[in-house]
């Protein structure tokens, strides 16, 4: 196991969201905000429609699955 698994993110560029880094550690394109909590999503700003962060997307899926 790698020692940097629990790294604090100190190597992240100032002001960058942890969600806005790609696999190489570089900041990617501007990411859309979640329409519910305003956290960055994994979708680019150019995506049309409702964008949800992974947490809100999971909660929405649970809510709609149990509304039968």
Image (cartoon, grey):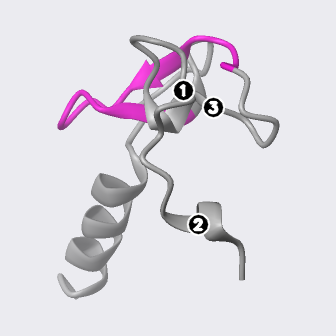
Which residues lie in the magenta part? 27-42
Report x, y in % for residue 29.
68, 13
Screen quadrant of the N terminus: bottom right
Q: Residue 5, which numbered label?
A: 2
Q: Residue 45, which numbered label?
A: none
Give the Cα distance between marks 1 and 3: 8 Å
Q: Are marks 2 and 3 in contact (CB under 8 Å)?
A: no
Q: Secondary structure at mark 1?
A: loop
Q: Residue 21, which numbered label?
A: 3
Residue receiving disc 1: 12
Screen quadrant of the C terminus: bottom left
Report x, y in % for residue 28.
70, 19
Q: Are marks 2 and 1 in contact (CB under 8 Å)?
A: no
Which of disc 3 and disc 1 is earlier in sequence? 1
In reply to whether residue 43 is colored magenta, the answer given is no
Instruction: Please report the residue visible at 31 percent of the width from the left and 83 percent of the height from the top.
Output: 65
Of the two numbered discs 2 and 3 in the rendering, the one whose residue sits closer to the viewer: 2
């Amino acid at each position: 196991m790698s020692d940097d698994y629990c790294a604090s993110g100190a190597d992240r560029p100032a002001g960058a969201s942890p969600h806005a880094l790609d696999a190489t550690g570089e900041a990617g394109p501007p990411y859309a905000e979640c329409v519910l909590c305003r956290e960055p999503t994994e979708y680019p700003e150019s995506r049309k429609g409702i964008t949800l962060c992974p947490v809100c997307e999971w909660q929405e899926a649970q809510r709609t699955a149990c509304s039968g």
